[in-house]
Amino acid sequence: MKLLRMILIFCLLSIITAGCTNANHSETSDKHVKEDTPVTGGIAAGSVEPTLTYEQKNGTAIFHFKLKNQTERVVTYHFTTSQRYDYKIETTDGELVKQYSKDRMFTQVLGDLKLKQAEEADFTSKVSDLSPGKYKITFWLTAKEDGPQASLNFTVK
């Protein structure tokens, strides 16, 4: 009886140990840069697809920076502050007009963004203090890993 109990305990410990050592530790980030490219259906192995769209309502430009995990695995991004994205707006001559992170403070706290297969994250930002003209906006993820980014040319009327 004592021998049977020892064998049972040994088997249970072996199963638990094997399960712990075979855990999936292969979550990595992707770097993929696209401009003005809409995401289409299906999974394209190996990339997190960024898209950037905007609309104008009552003098306010509303930007949607979306990331869609088109890989066959979970993708994790790690952050050292509460900031998840940044953007810069430039004139057509390359002059910096506005940057989201300028004159802002972010909480110094660690965080993660995990995107499962085919999952999407949406970051929305409103800008209302631009003069009429043509601009280029570039959004990017502020993760420790090289994150996706997207750019878009737009006009304020």
Image: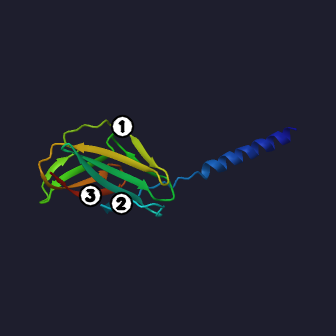
Q: Residue at x 85, y 38 (%)?
A: 2
Q: Nearer the viewer, residue 106 or 62?
A: 62
Q: Earlier in the sequence, mark 2 or mark 1?
A: 2
Does residue 2 appear to the left or right of 90 in the view shown?
A: right
Q: CA distance from mark 2 to mark 1?
A: 33 Å
Check the image and report above or below for 114 versus 41.
above
Q: CA distance from mark 3 to mark 1?
A: 28 Å
Q: Residue at x 67, y 45 (%)?
A: 16
Give the numbered dot on residue 38: 2
x and y percentages locating residue 66 in the rendered image: 36, 51
Does residue 56 appear to the left or right of 75 in the view shown?
A: left
Few, some or many C-alpha atoms within 10 Å of disc 2 (few <14, some 14-19, many ≥20)? Answer: few
| Type of amino acid under label 2 | Pro
Quarter of the image holding residue 40?
A: bottom left
Check the image and report above or below for 123 versus 136.
above
Few, some or many C-alpha atoms within 10 Å of disc 3 (few <14, some 14-19, many ≥20)? Answer: many
Question: Which mark is nearer the camera, 2 or 3?
Answer: 2
Give the numbered dot on residue 151: 3
SS class, disc 3: strand
Q: Earlier in the sequence, mark 2 or mark 3?
A: 2
Q: CA distance from mark 2 to mark 3?
A: 12 Å
| Type of amino acid under label 1 | Val
Q: What colouring method underlies this structural image?
A: rainbow
Q: Earlier in the sequence, mark 3 or mark 1?
A: 1
Question: Which mark is nearer the camera, 2 or 1?
Answer: 2
Which residue is label 1 attached to?
Answer: 109
Give the numbered dot on residue 144: none
**Badge 2 vs badge 1, beta-carbon distance below 8 Å:** no
| Type of amino acid under label 3 | Ser
x and y percentages locating residue 96 in the rendered image: 14, 52
x and y percentages locating residue 38 in the rendered image: 36, 60
Taking the view exactly as shown, the residue that stands out farthest to the front is 58
